[in-house]
Image: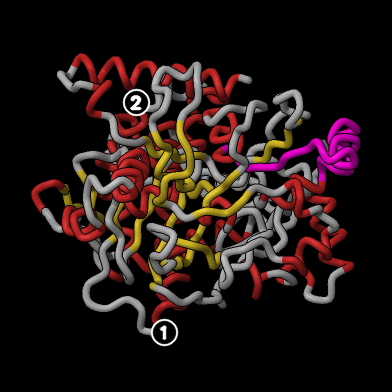
């Protein structure tokens, strides 16, 4: 129950800080918004309120054998469900994690048979507990989280009956799907803010899109453990031909139109820095990597591809494993550190190149392209400069880099009338709130580096069965 306790602590600290800053929380708090890590899967008992197994997180690859089995059995192979839900068969998505639980956890199988099991991503688990738990808690999810399960039809925004039937997933364990901005229910007893409406709910990357005020044709990249790049493509689904995911961007109200997105998900971004710190001991704190990398002007020809558990977009190679190539006798830890930072930026560039190909065919992006960035790693100025250099486009960082929380607050406030949609999106036009990084290298250098990166990526393929 660690997740629930962390939320309880978060609520307490947020209320304490607001009070210390002079806000009257008792009379001034109108609603709360919720945002969460997507795809992570929980199945729990509605009679006891207890999870039937540990949450299976988005990066967990234990479902790879189920994926291979389905790819062989289904006529469409890996892309069998893409037209309906926008997603390929992958270890990434909740449906495969749910199938693993069905096959491997007796408690889950028995509870499903008895009609006592409830499935959800983390938003569903939290809302159910926040609104009463086994004493009448609400079993809901929002459209953005539902779009990441591989079970929701992107056009109808409802659970897809054909997919459920094909995968043999009972509909009665699934939550009700709601929009991102509406009053879902009120906080129950024991949470410190009893009676306050939950009025906003979005998956973390979708919340960041709202926090960054991304309209049609605008993209954002969030740098955390992984990196997630989303381009708002407007009110029509675009099916990618270049390795991206079609997904929901946001739907800001029950009657509001849905905005869709192309997404590229990168498994290892900041986690590569953590690997340097925790596994190699090259740095003691994540913040030290910038200073270390600045000790050299380049990587010295070193390229690091962090395919620790395979590669996500646009490659989708779960047989890939990490490589560090170009090492010479003169390579030192500063070159390695800089190569790790570059790996984050190259992966984002791969995704954006695919986005430009997909959206360019539909003329979705007009004028100068710029990338809006957020997330903890964006405090690293060198990382942001490398990103601008490799893209050949400006990179724009807001003064408040925690745009995920901001997006959840925007959605909640919109639902209860604190502000309008126009208020939210016009706030993104205030340039004084941003720092812009412009590219400083030439096109020839940029192309040579990109070609070298591509060569390094191809060296990661077909390495999953290396002998121990």
**Image position of 20 (left or right of 315):** left
Residue 180, percent from left and from top: 44, 52
- Residue 362 visible (yes or no): yes
Disc 1 is placed on an element classified as helix
Q: In which quarter of the image is residue 157?
A: bottom right
In the displayed structure, 237 sits above or below 342; it is below
Q: How crowded is mark 2: few (under 14 residues within 10 Å), some or many (20 or more)?
A: some
Residue nearest the viewer, comparing 311 with 338: 311
Q: In which quarter of the image is residue 62?
A: top right
Which of pointers 2 and 1 lies earlier in the amino acid sequence? Answer: 2
User: Magenta residues?
Assistant: 100-122
Residue nearest the viewer, comparing 245 with 467: 245
> Gap between marks 2 and 1, in whole Å?
43 Å
Disc 2 is placed on an element classified as helix
Which residue in the structure is indicated by mark 2?
288
Residue 70, percent from left and from top: 84, 62
The residue mark sitting in front, 2 or 1, is 1
**Image position of 355 (left or right of 209):** right
Which residue in the structure is indicated by mark 1?
362
Residue appearing at x 26%, y 18% in the figure: 17
Residue appearing at x 34%, y 36% in the figure: 31
Residue 306, percent from left and from top: 56, 45
**Image position of 44 (left or right of 410):** right
Q: How is the structure coloured here?
A: secondary structure
Residue 226, percent from left and from top: 50, 44
């Amino acid at each position: 129950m660690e997740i629930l306790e962390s939320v309880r602590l978060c609520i307490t600290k947020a209320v304490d800080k607001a009070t210390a800053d002079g806000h009257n929380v008792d009379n001034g708090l109108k609603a709360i918004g919720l945002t969460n890590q997507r795809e992570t899967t929980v199945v729990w008992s509605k009679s006891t309120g207890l999870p039937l197994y540990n949450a299976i997180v988005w990066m967990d690859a234990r479902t790879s054998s189920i994926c291979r089995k389905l790819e062989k059995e289904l006529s469409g192979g890996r892309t069998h469900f893409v037209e309906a839900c926008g997603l390929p068969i992958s270890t990434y998505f909740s449906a495969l994690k749910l199938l693993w639980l069905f096959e491997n956890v007796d408690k889950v199988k028995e509870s499903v048979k008895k009609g006592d099991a409830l499935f959800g991503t983390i938003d569903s688990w939290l809302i159910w507990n926040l609104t009463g738990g086994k004493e009448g808690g609400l079993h809901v999810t929002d459209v953005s989280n539902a779009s990441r399960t591989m079970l929701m039809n992107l056009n109808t925004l409802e659970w897809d009956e054909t997919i459920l039937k094909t995968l043999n997933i009972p509909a009665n364990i699934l939550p009700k799907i709601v929009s991102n901005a509406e009053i879902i229910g009120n906080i129950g007893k024991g949470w410190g803010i009893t009676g306050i409406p939950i009025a906003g709910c979005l998956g973390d990357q979708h919340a960041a899109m709202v926090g960054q005020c991304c309209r049609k044709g605008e993209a954002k990249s969030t740098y955390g453990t992984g990196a997630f790049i989303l381009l708002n493509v407007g009110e029509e689904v675009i099916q990618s031909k270049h390795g991206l995911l079609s997904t929901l961007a946001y739907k800001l109200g029950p009657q509001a139109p849905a905005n869709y997105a192309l997404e590229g998900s990168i498994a290892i971004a900041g986690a590569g820095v953590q690997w340097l710190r925790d596994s190699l001991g090259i740095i003691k704190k994540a913040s030290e990597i910038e200073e270390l990398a600045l000790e050299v002007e380049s990587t010295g020809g070193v390229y690091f591809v962090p395919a620790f558990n395979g590669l996500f977009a646009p490659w989708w190679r779960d047989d890939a494993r990490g490589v560090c190539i170009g090492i010479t006798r003169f390579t030192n830890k500063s070159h390695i550190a800089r190569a790790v930072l570059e790996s984050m930026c190259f992966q984002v560039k791969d995704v954006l190149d695919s986005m430009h190909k997909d959206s360019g065919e539909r003329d979705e992006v007009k004028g100068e392209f710029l990338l809006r960035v957020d997330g903890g790693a964006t405090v690293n100025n060198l990382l942001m400069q490398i990103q601008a250099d490799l893209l050949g486009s400006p990179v724009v960082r807001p003064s408040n880099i925690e745009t995920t929380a901001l997006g959840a607050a925007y959605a909640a406030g919109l639902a209860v009338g604190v502000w309008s949609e126009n208020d939210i999106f016009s706030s993104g036009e205030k340039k004084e709130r941003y720092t812009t990084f412009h590219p400083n290298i030439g096109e020839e250098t940029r192309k040579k580096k990109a070609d070298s990166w591509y060569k390094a990526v191809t060296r990661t393929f077909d390495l999953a069965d290396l002998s121990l």
